């Protein structure tokens, strides 16, 4: 039985596939410190938990705006 690893730190490509955001948007989130990242040499890795939390907060803001319009 093979165990599938779930990496804690993602490349830009992995992060894009996970949340469906473009590389430029992810780069902006990383560069403004909205999501935690690590740089090792030239490689940048995005923290999966931080990215998922950011998306949950963004989803909550959308729900709040929709509720305010009703």
Image (tube, helix red, strand yellow):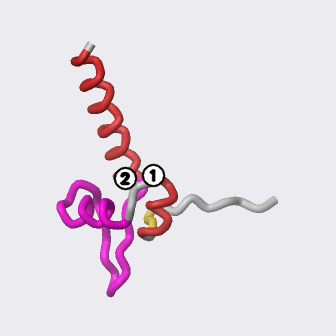
The percent position of residue 61, horizontal first and vertical second, equals 27, 32
Q: Which residue is drawn at 37% across and 81% down?
A: 43
The percent position of residue 63, horizontal first and vertical second, equals 32, 26
Q: Residue at x 23, y 18 (%)?
A: 69
Q: Which of marks 1 and 2 is nearer the N terminus?
A: 1
- The answer to whether residue 3 is left or right of residue 16 is right
For the residue pair 30 and 47, the one nearer the viewer reads as 30
In this view, the residue farthest toward the top is 70
**Where, quadrant-wise, is the C terminus in this rendering?**
top left
Disc 2 is placed on an element classified as helix
Contact, mark 1 vs mark 2 (Cβ under 8 Å): yes
Q: Does the magenta stretch include residue 34?
A: yes
Disc 1 is placed on an element classified as helix
* 50 shown above or below 32: above
Mark 1, mark 2: which one is toward the viewer? Answer: 1
Q: Is residue 32 magenta?
A: yes
Which label belongs to residue 39? Answer: none
Rounded to the nearest whole Å, what is the CA distance between mark 1 and mark 2? 8 Å
Total of numbered circles in the picture? 2
Q: Mark 1 points at which residue?
A: 19
- The answer to whether residue 36 is left or right of residue 43 is left
Q: Residue at x 26, y 59 (%)?
A: 29
The magenta stretch spans which residues? Answer: 23-48
Which label belongs to residue 51? Answer: 2
């Amino acid at each position: 039985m093979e165990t599938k690893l779930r990496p804690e730190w993602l490349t830009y490509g992995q992060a894009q596939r996970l949340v469906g955001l473009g590389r430029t948007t992810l780069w902006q989130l990383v560069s403004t410190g909205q999501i935690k990242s690590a740089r090792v040499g030239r490689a940048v890795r995005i923290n999966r938990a931080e990215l998922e939390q950011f998306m949950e907060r963004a989803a909550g803001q959308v729900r709040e705006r929709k509720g305010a319009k009703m």
